[in-house]
Image (cartoon, grey):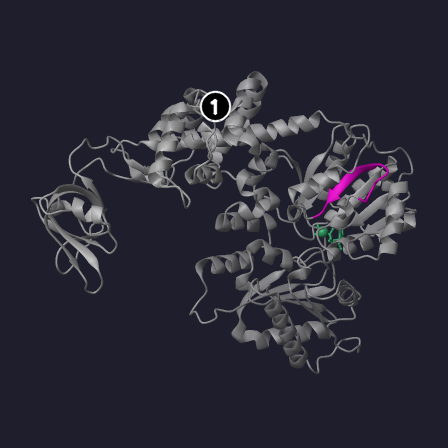
């Protein structure tokens, strides 16, 4: 749909005024954008109230005659006006005022005044009320107050919105009845048309319950939310179908003694049922000529890496290259080592790419990748740089996908320049996505879920402990060390200052070293305590990580750099200092670093209340959730409840793509409706569907596709 031209499109375009620029800034360019710019709140100017009936705190409109006016200077210069409406008097105070205002409030004038009534020792007062000359009709509707920015006066915006509303093309995509049936089932009120809904929300009649407008439960709001959710579903469905029209190399499993089969045979463990099922889902996708677009979600420790390795093996079996990209060097290196360990004995050449590697090494790697000799490439963002040319990339695996931006994921996808083909994409995440989010923002992805942990894990016991009881925690650490186990101690990231962050970790490291003097290991080796933080040189980081992984170090003190991917099965205790400062899913990720082996593992959440007598409510809720459950899905659900969807969306959260009106926590039923409706609409009325998406998303639909 073309945007509706502004009313005077043919006249020469004058330079934009500040107000017009401000409208642009708010994204209010098309008539429909203006029509959808909804009031933040409303003022009731439809009634005139008698002062006698106004209670303290009420915002009211009165009509009264000025009986006195003076400018006083104590305690500071102010205009003090007394008015009388026949029922009572009221004092108006203005600390800044113009001569014209003073004149309008001359004794004897009758004025219409709006403001909040305050009581007071000397009777009713209003501070800086708005006022105008009395008389004239009262408006029939509540007065909308719109969200605005500096340089855009409310009155100008109001006019612009109302004329946008008048011009906007608001024909319905779906009849009210379409949704009425559905909403009827869930006990909602009948739906309004889009035009009715918008007219109403911009000019509600005074009999409406303002609460239903503010909490968005009013039928006019239901209509808008249904519209918005439908647009989102349509756009996701469209991008899914567009992708289905693209080509990808069909990576059918090769017959007989394949790499995949040899890898399976060589693994030191058998796959879990969930790994098998998910592996088949992925293999099925990759065997098709349509690019796979699949998200593999599985709790920390669920065993995603081996699933990725099997997908890679299938790809290499078919004679194509595979790339695995991870968000941090530590994580990428872990994958590299693991995959190398599995695949090198089977004769596979794996290339390693990172931003910190020496130019000479990198050139060698680039040559291996370009010639196709390296069948598998593992690395960080370095993989998507222009210089990296693949011979024939067919499978791109992205670990912790939410930590990458849209552009980065697209860049990896574009690494296959081969007869108009796209590679298959497998994205992995340890943050399970709650169902409503999966249904909305991720509706263009197929989702595979590893819902079973590998066998032999004992559940992690989580304890929430006040930092005053640090000594007890130290004792626990001693006990673990003496049994030959290893311990993580995580310090919070102090956002304002990386330097503080470092001091904090360094200090903790020194304190622990002192507190653990005399601790002994079962094997008689010295007790070593390592330190890992973001400012360290990457080689030093690797050295520390390597020593911990090899079991040479008993305790690793770290800032949150170990958040993802670290895999040391012998680690059995995780201490998180200032746990109250971490987000819920971050705590869960950190906790997932232990409990990877057969030993009983524990997580201690050390919290501090600082100066405050106790923790804030959300911090307590987070710690409680951690103590109550180990289930990543339950954690994700509670996290969504506590924080809203923003955090889950990572790069998708680019404000524009967010739902403005619908709320996934409360509008599940409307979401279900939109999901069911979208394919019907797209199949039967494709033009109507396209119009709907353009109306709602304008140019923003692209954001939803990556
Ligand atoms: P994540 O899903 O968090 O990436 P990993 O892939 O790192 O988990 O796996 C966690 C640990 O479990 C690794 O040490 C891995 O080798 C091991 N593992 C994976 N699958 C199985 C299995 N089926 N049986 C036993 N151990 C497994
Ligand atoms: Mg992993």
Residue 484 position within the rendered picture, expressed as x and y whole percent measured from the top left: 75, 71
Instruction: Residue 434: say if magenta.
Output: no
Q: Is residue 289 left or right of residue 505?
A: right
Instruction: Residue 396: say if magenta.
Output: yes
Position of the C terminus, as image quadrant, is: top right
Residue 467 position within the rendered picture, expressed as x and y whole percent measured from the top left: 54, 72
Residue 500 position within the rendered picture, expressed as x and y whole percent measured from the top left: 59, 69
Q: Is residue 257 left or right of residue 449?
A: right
Query: Residue lying farthest left?
Result: 86
Residue 517 position within the rendered picture, expressed as x and y whole percent measured from the top left: 69, 82
Mark 1 C-beta closer than 8 Å to ligand 2: no
Location of mark 1 (residue)? 4
Query: Residue lying farthest top?
Result: 684
How crowded pointer 1 is (Cα within 10 Å; few <14, some 14-19, many 20+) is rated as: some
Depth check, front residue: 535 or 427: 535
Depth check, front residue: 391 or 267: 391
Depth check, front residue: 353 or 241: 353
Q: Quadrant of residue 411?
A: top right
Give the magenta range: 387-399
| Residue ID at (77%, 75%) | 522
Q: Quadrant of residue 309?
A: top right
Q: Quadrant of residue 166?
A: top left
- Residue 594, visible in the rendered structure: no
Residue 138 position (above or below residue 576): above
Q: Is residue 6 left or right of residue 633?
A: left
């Amino acid at each position: 749909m073309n945007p509706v031209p502004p009313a005077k499109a043919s006249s020469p375009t004058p330079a934009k005024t500040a107000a017009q620029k401000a409208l642009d800034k708010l994204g209010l360019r098309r008539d429909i954008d203006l029509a959808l710019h909804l009031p933040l709140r409303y003022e009731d100017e439809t009634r005139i109230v008698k002062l006698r009936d106004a209670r303290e705190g009420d915002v009211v409109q009165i009509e009264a005659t000025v009986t006195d006016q003076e400018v006083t200077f104590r305690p500071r210069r102010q205009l003090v006006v007394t008015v009388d409406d026949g029922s009572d008097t009221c004092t108006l105070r203005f600390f800044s005022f113009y001569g014209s205002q003073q004149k309008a409030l001359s004794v004897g004038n009758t004025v219409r005044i709006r403001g909040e009534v305050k009581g007071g020792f000397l009777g009713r007062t209003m501070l800086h009320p708005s006022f105008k000359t009395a008389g004239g009709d009262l408006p029939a509707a509540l007065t909308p107050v719109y969200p605005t920015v500096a340089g855009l006066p409310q009155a100008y915006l109001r006019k612009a919105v109302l004329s946008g509303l008048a011009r906007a093309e608001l024909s319905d995509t779906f009849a009210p009845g379409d949704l009425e049936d559905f909403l009827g089932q869930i006990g909602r009120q009948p739906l309004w048309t889009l035009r009715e809904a918008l007219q109403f929300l911009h000019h509600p009649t005074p009999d409406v319950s303002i609460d239903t407008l503010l909490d968005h439960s009013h039928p006019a709001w239901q209509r808008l939310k249904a519209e918005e959710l439908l647009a989102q579903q349509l756009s996701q469905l469209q991008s899914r179908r567009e992708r289905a029209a693209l080509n990808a190399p069909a990576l059918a499993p090769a017959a007989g003694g394949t790499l995949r089969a040899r890898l399976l045979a060589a693994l030191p463990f058998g796959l879990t049922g969930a790994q098998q099922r998910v592996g088949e889902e992925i293999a099925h996708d990759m065997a098709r000529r349509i690019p796979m677009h699949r998200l593999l979600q599985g709790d920390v420790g669920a065993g995603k890496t081996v699933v990725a390795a099997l997908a890679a093996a299938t790809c290499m079996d078919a004679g194509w290259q595979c790339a695995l990209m991870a968000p941090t060097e530590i994580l990428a290196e872990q994958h590299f080592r693991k995959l190398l360990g599995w695949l090198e004995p089977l004769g596979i050449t794996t290339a390693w790419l990172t931003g910190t590697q020496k130019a000479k090494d990198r050139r060698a790697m680039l040559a291996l990748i370009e010639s196709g000799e390296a069948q598998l490439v593992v690395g960080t963002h370095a993989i998507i740089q222009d210089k990296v040319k693949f011979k024939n990339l067919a499978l791109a695996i992205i670990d912790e996908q939410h930590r990458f931006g849209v552009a980065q994921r697209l860049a990896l996808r574009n690494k296959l320049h081969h007869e108009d083909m796209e590679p298959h994409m497998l994205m992995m995440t340890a943050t399970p996505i709650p169902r409503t989010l999966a249904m909305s923002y991720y509706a263009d992805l197929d989702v595979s879920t590893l819902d079973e942990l590998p066998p032999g894990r004992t559940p992690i016991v989580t304890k929430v402990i006040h930092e005053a009881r640090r000594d007890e925690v130290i004792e626990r650490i001693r006990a673990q060390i003496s049994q030959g186990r290893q311990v993580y101690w995580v310090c919070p990231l102090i956002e304002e200052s990386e330097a503080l962050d470092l001091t904090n970790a360094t200090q903790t490291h020194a304190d622990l070293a002192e507190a653990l003097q005399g601790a002994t290991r079962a094997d008689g080796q010295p007790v070593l305590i390592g330190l890992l933080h973001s400012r360290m040189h990457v080689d030093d980081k690797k050295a520390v990580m390597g020593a911990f992984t090899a079991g040479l170090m008993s305790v690793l003190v770290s800032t949150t750099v170990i958040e993802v991917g670290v895999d040391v099965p012998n680690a059995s205790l995780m201490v998180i200092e200032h746990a109250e400062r971490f987000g819920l899913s971050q705590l869960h990720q950190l906790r997932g670093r232990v409990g990877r082996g057969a030993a009983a593992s524990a997580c201690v959440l050390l919290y501090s209340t600082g100066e405050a007598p106790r923790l804030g409510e959300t911090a307590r809720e987070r710690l409680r959730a951690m103590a109550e459950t180990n289930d990543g899905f339950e954690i994700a659900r509670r996290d969504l409840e506590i924080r809203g969807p923003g955090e889950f969306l990572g790069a998708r959260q680019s404000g524009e793509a967010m739902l403005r009106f619908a709320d996934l926590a409360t509008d599940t039923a409307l979401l279900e409706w939109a999901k069911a409706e979208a394919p019907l609409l797209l199949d039967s009325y494709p033009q109507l569907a396209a119009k709907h998406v353009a109306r709602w998303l304008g140019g923003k639909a692209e954001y939803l596709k990556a």
